[in-house]
Image (cartoon, rainbow, N blue to C red):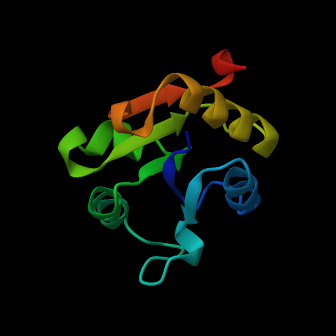
Amino acid sequence: MGYRLLLDENVENEATDRLTAAGHDVEHVDRVSGLGKGTSDADLARYSAETDRTIVTYDDDFVARFSPDEYRAVLFFEDESISVTELVAIVDAMAEVYPHEEVKGIQKTGREWL
C-alpha cells in the first residue's frame, strides 16, 4: 500500500522518483503548479488537507506552529542526515504497517524503522 505524499522543499528531489518507483503517489513542492520553493508552511498545510497528501519534511515548523486539523498528516524526520535511500526505506516500512488512512497528525520518524 502506497502513501499519498507531498515532499517539502528540504527533501531532495531524487526522493520523488524513488518513492514513486516504490509505489507511492508523490508530489514535490518544487514541481507542483501554484506552490514551488518558498511556499509558506500554511499553504503547504492547506494543500495537504485539500489533496489528502501527507507532508514529508525535515522542518519542525509543523510540530510547533500548526494544529493537526490544519493538514492531512506530517512525517517529520528530525535527523537531516538521513539519506534518500533511508528515507524511502523508512516510508516503505511505515506503509507496510500503517495504511495511508491511519496516518494522522505529526509522526516523528527516523532510523528506528530500518
Foreground of the two, 64 or 29? 29
Residue 67 seen in this snapshot: no
- Please name the residue shown 51% across and 45% down the image: 3
- Please name the residue shown 45% across and 50% down the image: 55
Q: In the drawing, does residue 104 fall left or right of residue 109?
A: left
Question: Looking at the rendering, in which quadrant would you find the C terminus?
Answer: top right
View extreme (bottom): residue: 33
Q: In the drawing, does residue 66 fall left or right of residue 35?
A: left
Foreground of the two, 11 or 38? 11
70 in relation to 108, above or below: below
> In x, y percent, where is residue 74?
42, 41
Q: In the drawing, does residue 108 fall left or right of residue 16?
A: left
Query: How many numbered marks are there?
Result: 0
Q: In the drawing, does residue 4 fall left or right of residue 102?
A: right
> In x, y percent, where is residue 17?
73, 61
- Residue 65 figure quarter: top left
Foreground of the two, 34 or 2? 2
> In x, y percent, where is residue 99?
45, 32
Foreground of the two, 1 or 46? 1
Question: Looking at the rendering, in which quadrant would you find the N terminus?
Answer: top right
102 in relation to 43, above or below: above
View extreme (top): residue: 112
- Please name the residue shown 48% across and 27% down the image: 108
- Residue 82 figure quarter: top right
Residue 22 seen in this snapshot: yes
- Please name the residue shown 18% across and 44% down the image: 69
